[in-house]
Amino acid sequence: MDLEYTVIETVHQNNAGQVTKINYEFDETVATEASTSSSSSSIARQNKEKRNRTYDVTITREQYQGMAKQLSNALSFDAFVSVLRPFIMGYYKDNELERAFSTLDRDRSGSINVKELNSFLPILNETANGEALNAYVRKVDDNFDGNLSYNEFRSLVLRGIGRDIICNHL
């Protein structure tokens, strides 16, 4: 199975340059191959199937602030947006990933724990509870300490796992 996806990001700002709304449009194509043949003497065929899925995620500053009130440790909207971009896009430029890591590492321990991820992810995916987040962290947790170092966080983003966590419920 091969997964190809494109993401288009649209950021809306007010006259003062403050982000008021952010939109991500996803286009995913999953390609699967199945070999079939009707008998041992026949020519083998390969069937290819492609499935396409398109969806988008939009969040406004006002929506976010309303949802953030439900969390005890939610990020500010501006901090949320700075973390969201590399997570959703699956890549980063300049020092975006370092800023995202630093924003999530709220206790300044040099690693991100599940509680810190919980200050960010449940806003976009209400099923991203501690148990689900631990399962995702284990996929990249090289030293098995239950936390994400910068390199493990980078791996999470580059493998698209962050996007999967966010979009899993869509």
Image: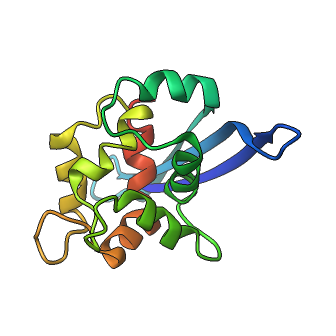
Asked whether, in this view, residue 16 is left or right of residue 60, the answer is right
Viewer-side residue, 61 vs 4: 61
The picture places residue 42, in percent across and down from the top left corner, at 38, 56
Q: Is residue 123 above or below residue 130?
A: above
Q: Position of residue 143 (x, y in %)?
A: 14, 77
Give residue 157's quadrant in the image. bottom left
Question: Residue 26 location in percent, x, y?
Answer: 62, 42
Q: Is residue 42 left or right of residue 30?
A: left
The extreme right residue here reads 15
Confirm whether residue 114 shows in the render.
yes
Left-right relation of 34 to 86: left
> How many numbered callouts?
0
Q: Is residue 117 above or below residue 15?
A: below
> Relative to residue 7, is residue 108 drawn left or right?
left
Q: How is the image coloured?
A: rainbow
Q: Residue at x 63, y 31 (%)?
A: 61
**Residue 33 visible here:** no
Quadrant for the N terminus in the image: bottom left
Q: Quadrant of residue 142?
A: bottom left
At x 14% / y 63%, what residue is drawn?
Answer: 146
* Residue 74 spot, x, y in % from top left: 39, 39
- Where residue 27 sits, quadrant-wise, is top right
Vertical order, 79 against 123 (above or below): below
- Toward the viewer: 88 or 120? 120
Viewer-side residue, 68 vs 163? 68
Please report the residue visible at 29 percent of the width from the left and 30 percent of the height from the top: 127
Q: Report the residue at 33% width, 30% height from top.
A: 71
Q: Looking at this rendering, what residue extends furthest in the left direction?
A: 144
**Picture layout, residue 133 above or below residue 103:** above
